[in-house]
Amino acid sequence: MTARKPLVFGASVRAADGIIIALALSVSVFSGVLVYALPGRQQAVVIEGSDGSWIFPLEAEEIVSVPGPLGATAVELRGGRARVLSSPCTNQLCVAAGTIHAHGQWIACLPNKVLVRVEAEEGAEELDGTAW
């Protein structure tokens, strides 16, 4: 068995690979921040139920009782996050969903017809993550 000769440009190819990988990671992180951070735009929590809809600033601190066909669903707004505290549905998937805090995230309680979502302030014309 003969030993293979190293490539003449072996070291420079490895350095270029590292530079390309670092550049790709930087572009990915920067793009993610631009798409999901929504700088300069206020975010709001929109809660929809069978009796209408409510809009709260994401920074609100309260518990909202949302009526539905099965009973009341409790939605908590605290610390810039929203979550479903309790619901009369049987599977409790909406409660297990955890918290939401970024534009485009949502929680739905389908049996009780309640939807909680985070949106950017109305009137904003720029593209966001859900537009792509």
Image (cartoon, rainbow, N blue to C red):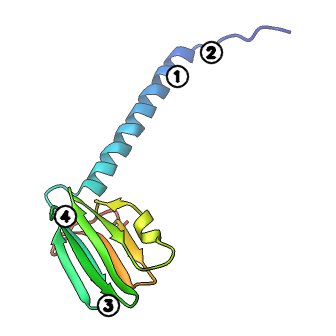
Q: Which residue is mark 2?
A: 7
Q: Residue at x 26, y 67 (%)?
A: 76
Q: At which x and y percent is residue 60?
A: 15, 65
Q: Quadrant of the N terminus?
A: top right
Contact between labelled residues 2 and 1, with CB atoms less than 8 Å apart: yes
Q: At which x and y percent is residue 69?
A: 38, 91
Above/below status of 23 relative to 127: above
Q: Is residue 109 left or right of residue 36?
A: right
Q: Is residue 4 left or right of residue 100?
A: right
> Could you tell me which secondary element the residue under label 2 belongs to?
loop
What is the distance, in whole Å, between disc 2 and disc 4 at their CAs? 57 Å
The numbered mark at residue 50 is: 3
Q: At which x and y percent is residue 88?
A: 41, 80
The numbered mark at residue 13 is: 1
Name which of mark 2 and mark 4 comes first in the sequence.
2
- Residue 38, located in which quarter of the rendered image? bottom left
